[in-house]
Image (cartoon, grey):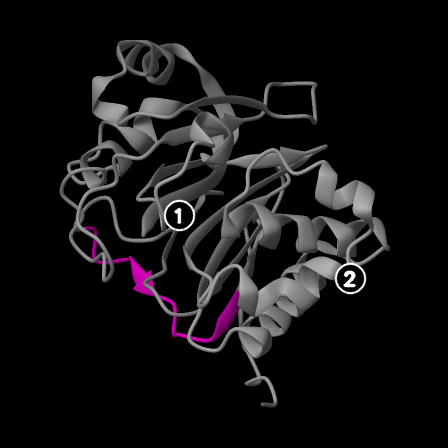
């Protein structure tokens, strides 16, 4: 449904991760190598990054295909950061949300992306949506399944849950309410990455040096890339990475 990537490391131009690799995210928008659902990711794109001295990320998002945006090519060439999250989108359903439905979503210091689809949307998760405070539902800027999943994560964060726990509990709740959903989530707060492999591909690359990349698929043929097993929670910093298997939800 989508391709996404997050990276932590020394200062880098966005293009070092997104455009320069032979199979970078921009190329994955029209020629993904390991995408299981869909073939072209032309329904929007976005990138979020962190500037020195400011914990709140900036974002650039558009509704169309990334290959047709000349401004993005300039940004990728000159903007530098030590942490980023970017995505290209193949929409689950056609809709009018446009740019608002393009990842990364953001609140405060956290960037979020969802690769997948909620099975039976929207009826299957109506009870989860109904449990959210009305103000949180009304604040949704898009009406797609990814926006609701993000709202569920945010609600747990507001209740004091740490990022890995909020993500894990959200995935288990949605998977229980909507079996068969694909819930590959990817988040960063600029210092750590949290991701889930649930129904689609997820890979990671560590090094050289204090550098960690987590992505839907490798952007090159470096043999150090490792695939994350399905039904796994990944948590990472620039120096450490942990894989934790999920326990299947009780039906």
> Which one is earlier in the sequence, the residue at label 1 or at label 2?
2
From the top left corner, tell me how far across and down residue 232 is, in percent.
49, 72
Q: Badge 2, how many Cα within 10 Å: few under 14, some, many 20+? A: few
Q: Secondary structure at mark 2?
A: loop
Residue 159 sits inside the magenta stretch: no
Q: Which of the labelled discs sits on residue 49, or is there none?
A: none
204 over 88 or under it: above or below: below
199 over 77 or under it: above or below: below
Question: Between 151 and 15, which is closer to the camera in this rendering?
Answer: 151
From the top left corner, tell me how far across and down residue 169 is, in percent.
67, 69
Question: Between 196 and 207, which is closer to the camera in this rendering?
Answer: 196
Image mark count: 2
Q: Is residue 138 left or right of residue 215?
A: right
| Extreme residue in the bottom direction | 251
Q: Which residues are magenta?
A: 222-233
Question: Between 176 and 46, which is closer to the camera in this rendering?
Answer: 176
Q: Main secondary structure of the magenta part?
A: loop
Residue located at (47% from left, 32% from top): 97
From the top left corner, tell me how far across and down residue 173 is, in percent.
64, 72
Q: Badge 1, how many Cα within 10 Å: few under 14, some, many 20+? A: few
Give how far apart the Cα atoms at labels 1 and 2 are: 42 Å
Q: Is residue 138 left or right of residue 99?
A: right
Residue located at (34% from left, 64% from top): 200
Q: Secondary structure at mark 1?
A: loop
Q: Which residue is mark 1?
A: 207
Q: Is residue 134 left or right of residue 102?
A: right
Disc 1 vs disc 2: which is toward the camera? 2
172 over 139 or under it: above or below: below
Whether residue 119 is visible, yes or no, is yes
Q: Which residue is mark 2?
A: 131
């Amino acid at each position: 449904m989508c391709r996404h990537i997050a990276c932590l490391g020394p200062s880098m131009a966005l293009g070092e991760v997104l455009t320069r690799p032979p199979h970078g995210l921009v190329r994955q928008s029209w020629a993904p190598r390991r995408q299981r659902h869909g073939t072209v990711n032309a329904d929007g794109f976005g990138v979020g990054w962190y500037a020195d001295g400011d914990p709140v990320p900036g974002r650039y998002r558009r509704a169309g295909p990334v290959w047709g945006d000349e401004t993005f090519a300039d940004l990728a060439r000159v903007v530098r950061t030590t942490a980023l999250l970017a995505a290209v989108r193949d929409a689950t359903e056609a809709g009018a949300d446009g740019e608002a439905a393009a990842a990364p979503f953001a609140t405060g210091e956290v960037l979020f992306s969802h690769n997948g689809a909620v099975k039976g949307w929207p009826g299957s998760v109506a009870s989860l949506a109904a449990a959210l405070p009305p103000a949180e539902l009304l604040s949704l800027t898009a009406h797609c399944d990814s926006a609701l999943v993000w709202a569920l994560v945010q609600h747990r964060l507001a209740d004091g849950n740490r990022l890995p726990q909020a993500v894990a509990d959200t995935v288990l709740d949605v998977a229980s309410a909507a079996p068969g959903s694909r819930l590959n989530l990817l988040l960063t707060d600029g210092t750590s990455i949290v991701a889930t492999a649930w129904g689609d591909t997820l890979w990671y690359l560590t090094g050289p040096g204090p550098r960690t990349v987590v992505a839907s698929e490798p952007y090159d043929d470096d043999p150090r890339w490792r695939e994350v097993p399905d039904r796994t929670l990944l948590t990472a910093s620039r120096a450490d990475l942990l894989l934790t298997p999920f326990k299947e939800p009780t039906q």
